[in-house]
Image (tube, grey):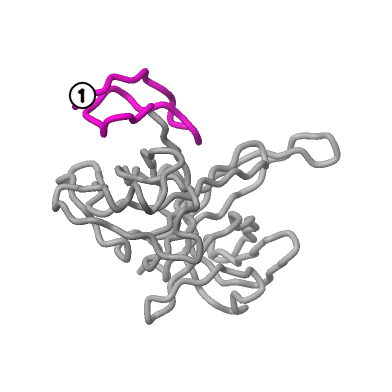
Amino acid sequence: MLILVASGVLAQKGTAPSGNYPPGYPGDMWTGVITAIDEKTRQITITHVRDGQTESFTGVVAPSYVARRRGLEAREMDLSKIVTGSRGQAYYLRDRTSTDLGKWTGPRGFPFQAQGPTPEKSFHLVFLLDLLDDNGKSTTGTVTATNEDAREITLSVPKGGGAEEFVGEVIQGLHMRQAGGQAFELKVSQVPLGTRITIFYTTERKKVAGKWVSYRLIYRFEPPRK
């Protein structure tokens, strides 16, 4: 069934462009950084930061959902393959329950039962996820200081024959995966001093003492690039 909805902008909560969507879809979507994924409950969290204010969307990824990435075929993707810290855009149906999910049939036609102590609690059902191009910058350096209260990490970044200091603020709710695949919420104080890391960031602004100031928002970590 083809449902036509109005176009919108790519900023946190928005309206999907025209397309072929499930019946009853009003056009809701959310854009931001994918900060958490729970593979057992299929819960995904996408966080948007603007002017120092943080808003988060949490939804349940439907069975046989579709993931899209520019240059690749649209298909279902194992949730473990989605990197936290990536930019994503979720298309979702509001206020659904496990009963609705039992009736949901994706391309493969199998039902899905939500897990948890309150199976009839309503949630947002994500049926389409766009994995967006990264629009930030990156730098590699050695961790020299952390500040849990301010969520700040300081790096010493090589430059020329010396080094320069880089200070960034880690986005709220960012989860990382351990070697065994288990996810945990990152605490800035747990980042070991002396570690070399590559961080990805954007330059944002926020009000401090009534004045706008710029700061670097860190949204992803990776091992150092060679």
The quarter of the picture where the N terminus appears is top left
The image shows residue 154 at horizontal and vertical percentages of 65, 64
The image shows residue 30 at horizontal and vertical percentages of 45, 38
Q: Which quadrant of the figure has residue 203?
A: top right
The quarter of the picture where the C terminus appears is bottom left
**Residue picked out by circle 1:** 2
Q: Nearer the viewer, residue 193 or 98?
A: 98
For image coordinates 20% across by 48% down, the residue present is: 106
**What range of the chain is rendered magenta?**
1-26
Relative side of 188 to 115, left or right = right
Q: Residue most toward the bottom?
A: 180
- For residue 147: magenta? no
Q: Nearer the viewer, residue 205 or 107?
A: 107
Q: Residue most toward the right?
A: 209
> Label 1 crowding class (10 Å Cα cut-off): few <14, some 14-19, many 20+?
few
Q: Is residue 38 above or below residue 206?
A: below
- For residue 11: magenta? yes
For image coordinates 55% across by 68% down, the residue present is: 185
Secondary structure category for the residue under label 1: loop
For image coordinates 38% across by 39% down, the residue present is: 92
The image shows residue 187 at horizontal and vertical percentages of 62, 70
Q: Nearer the viewer, residue 85 or 27?
A: 27
Relative side of 39 to 144, left or right = left
Relative side of 187 to 209, left or right = left
Q: Which quadrant of the figure has residue 222?
A: bottom left
Q: Nearer the viewer, residue 160 or 96?
A: 96
Would you say the magenta stretch is mainly helix, strand or loop? loop
Q: Amino acid at mark 1?
A: Leu
Q: Is residue 68 above or below residue 210?
A: below
The image shows residue 72 at horizontal and vertical percentages of 17, 46
Relative side of 61 to 161, left or right = left
